[in-house]
Image (cartoon, coloured by chain):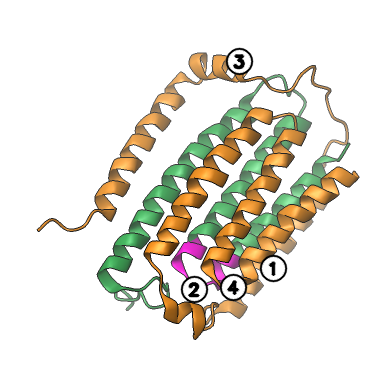
Amino acid sequence: MDSLSDYLLLSALLFSLGLCVTLVRRHAILVLIGIELMLNAANLNFIAFWRFGPNPEALDGLLFVLFSLAVAAAEAAVGLALILAVYRRYSVTDVENIDELKG
Amino acid sequence: MSLTFAIIAAIVLTGAIGLSVLRKTVHCVLSLTIVFFGLAMLYIRLDAPFLGFALVLIYVSAVTILILFTVLLTRNREIETDVSPYSRGSIAGLIVGGSVFAGLIWMIYRAPLSRGITELESPASVKSLGERLMTEYVLPLEVIALLLTAAMIGAVIVAMKDPG
């Protein structure tokens, strides 16, 4: 059986990759995808800590992930709607060109 | 680390690296589905089959299709062909990501993690999850339902064409 630190390592890698995608890519949708990746890394941590914790019969870790999935779905829907609205208004999806509020 | 875990981790990381380096946005989104499939396999491996299948249902089907639709609705050829897909401050972004990773690794190796694992009689069943949701977690469930409704209505209003 794998150990808890394997899962934590994988989820740390996934989180950092998501952060890099968010910071490095220009396309607004990819920035959103990076955030999704980070959220899922956190979910993997929740499940790993639940499974390797002292009391896996209590399902609190799983319920946390269930709620976080719902919040992530809501976030994705609103984020994509915002990207669509920005595209309609300015015809860009490049986050570097959406700089009207920049001082 | 077992072989199964190594294979699944390789799948997840291939998808994640693919979505950070691929040029076309559509390819990145398809690579995201690989990541979610791998994560669902990991969930099932961690005795949470319901959440694994829920991840496939919500992410691989619903969210990815939603993202794909948005990609196709906001097609911008100039970005995908001429300009670099990376932003101007990408070196700084890589440095930030790398240092966050280093910090996380340092924390993981410093933390006093337990080595053992408690055996479960059976994987977490939908029945027990539902019982917990309907008794102890009924208020959070209601709040999440309200949040989802509000988010859906908000998304429709934001994405709606201006009237008139």
The first of marks 1 and 4 along the sequence is 4
Residue B18 falls in image quadrant: bottom right
Give the residue at mark 1.
Answer: B98
How far is disc 1 from disc 4 in space, using C-alphas?
A: 8 Å
Q: Which chain is green?
A: A
Q: Do the residues labelled 2 and 1 touch (CB within 8 Å)?
A: no
Q: Say which chain tag 1 marks.
A: B
Label 4 resides on the chain identified as: B
Q: What span is colored magenta in the figure?
A: A20-31
Q: Nearer the viewer, residue B145 or B55?
A: B55
Query: What is the x, y in percent for residue A43?
Result: 62, 42
Residue A3 point in image, percent of width and height: 85, 40
Residue at far bottom of view = B82
**From the image, which quarter does the N terminus of chain B lie in?**
top right
Using a 10 Å C-alpha cutoff, classify the residue at mark 2 as few (fewer than 14 neighbours), some (14 to 19) or many (20 or more): many
Q: Are marks 3 and 1 on the same chain?
A: yes
Q: Where is residue A89 in the image (x, y as percent from the top left)?
A: 25, 69
Question: How far apart, in angstroms, are the residues tagged by discs 2 and 1?
Answer: 19 Å
Marks 2/3 same chain: no
* Amino acid type shown at disc 3: Lys
Q: Residue at x 70, y 37 (%)?
A: B43
Q: Count the marks.
A: 4
**Residue B129: x percent and y percent?**
59, 20
- Determine the residue located farthest toward the left in the rendered image: B164
Counting residues from the N terminus, which is met first, the one under dot 3 or under dot 1? 1
Taking A1 as reference, is B86 left or right? Answer: left
CB-based contact (under 8 Å), mark 3 and mark 4: no
Label 3: which secondary element: helix
Q: Name the residue under label 3.
A: B127
> What residue is disc 2 on?
A26
| Amino acid marked by disc 1 | Gly
